[in-house]
Amino acid sequence: MKNFTYHSAKDSKEATKLSSSNSAFLAGGMTTIPSMKLGLASYKDIIDIKGIKKLSGIKVSGKSVIIGATTKHAEVANSKEIKKAIPSLSDLAEGIGDPAVRNRGTIGGSIANNDPAADYPSACIALNATIHTNSRKIEASKFFSGMFETTLKKGELIEAVEFQIPNKSSYQKHPNPASRYAVVGVYVAKNKNDVNVAITGAKSCVYKDENLSKALSKNFSVSAVDAVKVSSSGMNTDIHASAEYRASLVATYAKKAIEAC
Ligand SMILES: Cc1cc2nc3c(=O)[nH]c(=O)nc-3n(C[C@H](O)[C@H](O)[C@H](O)COP(=O)(O)OP(=O)(O)OC[C@H]3O[C@@H](n4cnc5c(N)ncnc54)[C@H](O)[C@@H]3O)c2cc1C
């Protein structure tokens, strides 16, 4: 691991002031620390944001659930308020990694990292989430821009993620048996004004499946999925699954999600 300077920020303003073109925020360190240890990333400054109280916690209002950026996966998995308002979100958090990862990893770190197989990005797209940063609010549909890429600017800090409470929803994934990352994960949400089917793990970046979303908006049923041909075009092929297998998993897990709604 290369040398770096460790800073502990007391508030968002200080965290963003300390950031530079060669810095990283330290939330749970679940991606940052192994990446540095393996020599995949190096930073001059590491800015610890865990001490910023305002960034952690869960608030549920009539219409939305707001989760602070440094809130850990285990807190979301165990939150009684989230289980009541959006049970699929606590199920998703419960299925992330292992207990160590769930007790260190954070929602802000997960979506800032935007791993193509991460779970939370699909929840953001399906539940029409808004990402609150230190300087603006970004709709989820405009946040995830590519593999490990987002529209965050350098030094921009996620403060919270706001999810709209759906009428019904479910997240179903085919997990990698070792890491639990999604080989394919499908988040189906029947919202007040739309139905969203968000897919993770299948391509280089999370996306909304427009064909499935449209079909389910007209007819929210398993048979509506059967009528849609899920194309494998642009899907990943790797040691875990071929593109064609991933396409079939999308259809299978979309049906499982509808049944579980
Ligand atoms: C063994 C293992 C298994 C895993 N399995 C899964 C899984 O099944 N599903 C899944 O979805 N994920 C999985 N993960 C990922 C994990 O859930 C973490 O969320 C992810 O690694 C990010 O870690 P972190 O929150 O600790 O962020 P960090 O590692 O601290 O930070 C990651 C990146 O996000 C940036 N960042 C952090 N917080 C903010 C913020 N508030 N604003 C702006 N930028 C920020 C940092 O600058 C850094 O670039 C796994 C990880 C491991 C190590």
Image (tube, rainbow, N blue to C red):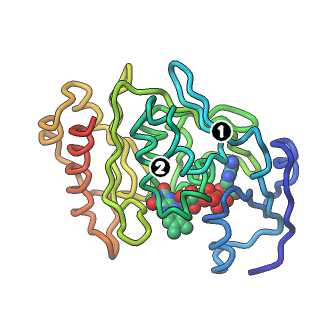
Residues under numbered marks 2 and 1 in contact, where contact means CB atoms less than 8 Å apart = no
Relative to 169, does residue 64 appear above or below in the rendering? Answer: above
Q: Nearer the viewer, residue 119 or 208?
A: 119
- Identity, as a three-letter code, of the amino acid under mark 2: Ala
Q: Residue at x 38, y 20 (%)?
A: 192
Which residue appears at 49% of the width and 37% of the height?
A: 141
Q: Which residue is mark 1?
A: 57
Q: Residue 39 placed where, x, y %? A: 67, 80
Which quarter of the figure is the N terminus placed in?
A: bottom right
Instruction: Identify the element where label 2 is drawn.
Output: helix
Q: How many C-alpha atoms fall within 10 Å of the one at disc 1: few (<14), some, or many (≥20)? A: some
* Three-letter code, disc 1: Gly
Residue 174, position as x, y percentages in the image: 31, 59
230 over 28 or under it: above or below: above
Q: Is residue 105 visible?
A: yes
What mark, if any, has residue 93 been given in the picture? 2
> Between disc 2 and disc 1, whose residue precedes?
1
Q: CA distance from mark 2 to mark 1?
A: 15 Å
Which secondary structure, mark 1? loop
Residue sitting nearer the eye, 139 or 49: 49
Residue 169 x %, y %: 34, 34
Query: Which image quadrant: the C terminus?
Result: top left
User: Taking the image as drawn, is residue 148 in sight?
Assistant: no
- Judged left or right of residue 93, residue 44 is right
Lateral position of residue 146 relative to residue 4, left or right: left
